[in-house]
Amino acid sequence: MNAAVEVQQLHKTYEVPVREGGVKAALKSLVRRQVRTVEAVKSIDFAVAPGEVIGFLGPNGAGKTTTLKMLSGLLHPTGGQVRVLGFEPFARQRVFLRQITLVMGNRNQLVWDIPVVDSFERNRAIYRLGRQEFRDTLDELVSLLDLGELLQKPVRNLSLGERMKCEVAAALLHRPGILFLDEPTIGLDVTMQRRIRAFIAEYNRRYHATVLLTSHYMADVEALCRRVVIIHHGQLLFNGELADLVQRFSPHKTIVVDLDREEQDLTAYGEVVGREGARVTLRVPKADTARVTARLLSEVPVVDLTVEDPQIEDVIEQVFSQDAA
C-alpha cells in the first residue's frame, strides 16, 4: 500500500537579516544588507501509512511547524521530495487541497465578529460543498463536538475551549482524508483536551483518516499515537513505535513504595528519586525490577507497592539530552 505521506531528504533553509542596533547600523543595512542562513529542517525522511496517527514531536524551534507547512503546501521546500496522497503539496492543486486540512492551535480561521455558523457557511462556499453534504457533515460534527449552543454565537464571545472545538469543526467540514494538527489542544483545560482527543480518535476510526499530530501535551500522544517521529534542530532523532522509544531511551522502571514508617532507608534497593512522608520512589534497571520488588516485599514492612513505566515526558527529555551530548 502506498504511503499517504512520504518525505525524502526534506530540507528547508531561510535567509534571516541580521544587523547591530543603532541608527548607523540601520542606515548601513539599507546599502549592504547582511543575512545569515538558518536551517529549519535538515534532510529528514519518514513515511505515514493511510489511516495511521503519528506523533510528530520536538521542542520549540525543532522544525515541526515548518515541516507541516511544507506538507500542506504553504511552504516550498529548499530540497528533497514530498508526496502527500501522491501530490506535490506546493503545487496546491484543488483536488489535493480538498483532501487535507491544517489545524494550528494558535491561529484563527473563524471570522471574529460573525456567528460561528456563518464562518462554517463561508467554508462551504470555499470548498464548493453541496447543501445536503454540508448539512450532513455539520450535523455529525455538532453531535460529536457538542456545538449546538455555539453555532449562533459570535466567535469573539467564545471561550478558548469553545473556539478550539469550532476551529476543529471548520477544518473538517469538507471531510479531509489527512489531518495536519499543530498543537490542537494548546491552552485548553484538561477536560477540553480529553474531548478533543476523543474526537480525533473517533474521526480517525470513522473515516480512516491519516493524522500527523504535534503536541507538547504528552497525554495527547499517549492517547492517540502508536508511532512517533522526533526531530530536534531540524534533524530526525527517532522514528518508531512509542513503546520502542520508552524501551530504547529509558532502561529503568519506577517503584513507588508506601511504608509503615517514614524513617525506613531504601537506598540499598535502588536510586531514591523521591520521598514524601512514608512514600518512597525508587528508580531501578528494568532487568532488576522483579528481583528488587521481591526483596522489598520480603524484607521491608510495605503497606503498598506499585511498579510504573517512566513518564513519556522524561523519555523525550532523555532523547534530547543524548542528542545535545
Image (cartoon, rainbow, N blue to C red):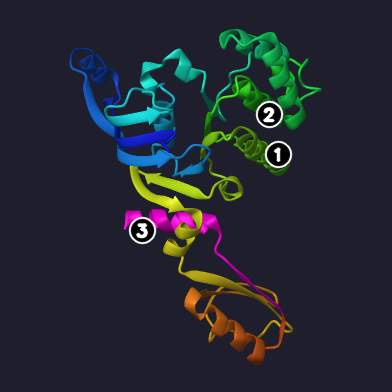
Quick one: label 3, few (<14), some, or many (20+) residues within 10 Å? few
Residue 106, x across and y down, in percent: 56, 28
Q: Residue at x 58, y 18 (%)?
A: 109
N-terminal of the pair, mark 2 or mark 3, is 2
Residue drawn where x is 56% and y is 33% of the image: 209
Towards the viewer: 37 or 41:
41
Q: Amino acid at mark 1?
A: Arg
Q: Write down the residue under mark 2.
A: 165
Three-letter amino acid code of the residue under disc 2: Lys
**In this rendering, position of residue 65 left or right of residue 299:** left
- On the picture, is 194 further left or further right than 93? right
Relative depth, front residue between 193 and 20: 193
Q: Nearer the viewer, mark 2 or mark 3?
A: 2
Q: Can you tell which mark lies on residue 195?
A: 1
Q: Tag 1's secondary structure? A: helix
Q: Vertical placement of 317 versus 194: above or below?
A: below
Residue 25: where, in percent of width, then height?
A: 24, 21
Quadrant where the N terminus lies? Answer: top left
Q: Outermost residue toward the bottom?
A: 299
Q: Left or right: 140 with respect to 103? A: right
Could you tell me which residue is drawn at 46 percent across and 13 percent down?
Answer: 94
Q: Which residue lies under the disc numbered 3?
A: 322
**Marks 2,1: beta carbons within 8 A:** yes
> Residue 182: percent from the left, percent from the top?
52, 33
Q: Quadrant of residue 304?
A: bottom right
Task: Please state if 282 lies on the left or on the right of 202 as rendered.
Answer: left
